[in-house]
């Protein structure tokens, strides 16, 4: 058995759609919430996802509209280019002060983490800066900041996007392909002057052919969408 005797089947059942699981557990009571927490921690033990766990801990502080936006959306785990134009839960979360504060905290931490990797203070491992699940949380946080037009977001995205897609030194790998691509989709979804400039900077620096191809597809639509927002 796994952590707190959570079976593999129960872990899969509870964590595949953990926002829905949270709403159901909240109605069922403390024992159900404890089982969900144990299941998420068991999954974390297999596939570390610290930011996803932190977001789970935040859910009790969110308003009902935010919880429903997360639970109802089929795009919560991964926001792709195909999702642009669909209802974005980040747009609802942007009105929730608790989630906005969480977004700032994790984005600034992520930027510092990438800074440390590029400065040689942390070892570089290709595509290992962030868990794939956590990249989705960070990308949603970036969209929340963009919907809110947060002033603090400009220096953060200027670090986060270019450094997520460019390895230290001359390697053609990247610290986080998943984050780089998810941020690019986010810039196209809800562009700001700073995020579009960060996208241009990333494209000028990126050496990974797959990431370059994805980000190139984001740039012109982002520039057009930014002009419409002006």
Image (spheres, rainbow, N blue to C red):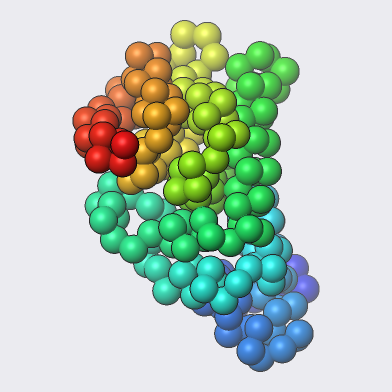
Residue at screen point 65% across, 35% down: 108
Name the residue at the top extreme. 170
Residue at screen point 25% across, 40% down: 228
Quarter in which the N terminus is drawn: bottom right
Rendering coords of residue 37 (x, y %): 70, 70
Rendering coords of residue 214 (x, y %): 28, 33
Rendering coords of residue 221 (x, y %): 22, 36
Residue at screen point 69% across, 56% down: 54
Quadrant of the rendered image containing residue 223: top left
Q: Is residue 34 above or below residue 196?
A: below
Image position of 209 (left or right of 20): left
Residue 35 visible somewhere in the drawing: yes
Name the residue at the bottom extreme. 28
Q: Between residue 38 and residue 72, name the one nearer to us.
A: 72
Q: Between residue 198 and residue 169, name the one nearer to us.
A: 198
Residue at screen point 45% across, 48% down: 147
């Amino acid at each position: 058995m796994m952590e707190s005797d959570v079976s593999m089947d129960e872990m899969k059942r509870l964590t595949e759609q953990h926002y829905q699981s949270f709403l159901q557990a909240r109605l069922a009571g403390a024992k159900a919430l404890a089982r969900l927490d144990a299941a998420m921690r068991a999954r974390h033990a297999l596939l570390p996802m610290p930011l996803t766990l932190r977001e789970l801990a935040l859910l009790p502080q969110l308003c009902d509209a935010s919880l429903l936006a997360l639970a109802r959306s089929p795009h919560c785990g991964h926001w792709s280019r195909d999702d642009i134009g669909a209802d974005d839960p980040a747009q609802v979360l942007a009105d929730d002060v608790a989630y906005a504060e969480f977004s700032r905290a994790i984005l600034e931490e992520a930027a510092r983490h990438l800074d440390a990797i590029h400065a040689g203070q942390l070892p570089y491992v290709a595509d290992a800066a962030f868990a794939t699940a956590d990249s989705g949380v960070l990308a949603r946080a970036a969209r929340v900041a963009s919907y809110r037009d947060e002033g603090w977001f400009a220096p953060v995205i200027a670090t986060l996007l270019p450094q997520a897609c460019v390895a230290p030194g001359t390697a053609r790998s990247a610290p986080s392909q998943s984050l780089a691509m998810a941020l690019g989709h986010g810039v196209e979804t809800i562009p700001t002057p700073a995020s579009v400039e960060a996208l241009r900077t990333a494209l000028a620096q990126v050496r990974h052919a797959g990431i370059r191809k994805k980000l190139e597809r984001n740039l012109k639509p982002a520039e057009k969408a930014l002009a419409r927002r002006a």
